[in-house]
Amino acid sequence: MLCVSQAIKNTLAREADIPPENMSVVYNGVETDLFVPPPEQPDGLKTLNQLSLLYAGSLNTHKGVHTAIEAMALLSKQSKAEDISLTIVGSGHPDYEARLKALVHENNLEKAVHFPGRVPREDMPALLQKFDVLVFPSIWEEPLARMTQEAMAAGMAVISTLTGGTGELVIEGETGLTFDPEDATVLAQRIDQLKNDPSLYKKLVKNGREKVLQQFDIRRMIDEIEMHLSDTIEKAPAQKILIP
């Protein structure tokens, strides 16, 4: 059996009583030739006087999008939200979408938080190049979040929870910054930290892209699946063919 992350393998071993030796981990891969960073600035160090944040995905409670808005509200109250914007791309449950927009209104964030709706899949590579940071506030145990992989490949820094398999990609201070699910206070601190530390931003972008190239490239995924299938065939007992 193939699992998309070690977290899924551990869960199946624990909850479905599947022997670990009967499972292998092959990470899902992304098209690193399609999801690429934008052209580098002449000085090689991006200026973060304006910080553009992005959430992209389904708008449902378990995705924790409200935490991102709450963090923006905290930054605003601390007078730290100037030149920071949050764009929320996607759609989902109407009641939750209404809750998110009400939260924006209650905190007077209409100029800072935007809801452009869904974006066609083919437009995502170009979209990601327009933003600095992916905020990934998921609450549920993500098997392996494709969005974080694509964002890192596209040259974005990532601030994320570590639910499920996400921790196998996002490593605190190395390939991203982290916070606990629904902890808007720490998320706000991480956003402010990144805005005020361009060298940290550059480090996370560089390491994140390298991490995806090394472990989460789609070509590597295909090779490992082929190797797994070949190994399975070699180990399978020969089948007798009965001719009536």
Image (spheres, helix red, strand yellow):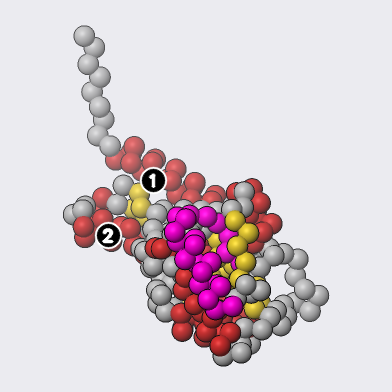
- Which residue is rendered at x = 50% and y = 72% of the image? 103
Q: Nearer the viewer, mark 2 or mark 1?
A: 2
Q: Where is residue 115 in the image (x, y as percent from the top left)?
A: 60, 62
**First in sequence: mark 2 vs mark 1:** 2
Instruction: Magenta stretch: give its range.
Output: 87-108
Image check: 142 left or right of 75?
left
Residue 222, above or below 110: above
Q: Is mark 1 on a helix, strand or loop?
A: helix
Is residue 94 found inside the magenta-colored segment of the image?
Answer: yes
Which quadrant, please, contains the C terminus? top left
Label 2 sits on residue:
11
Q: What element carries label 2?
A: helix
Q: Which residue lies furthest to the bottom in this view?
A: 78
Q: Residue furthest right?
A: 42
Label 1 sits on residue:
228
Task: Give the residue type at disc 2.
Answer: Thr
Q: Which residue lies furthest to the top in this view?
A: 244
Residue 72, above or below 21: below
Is residue 69 found inside the magenta-colored segment of the image?
Answer: no
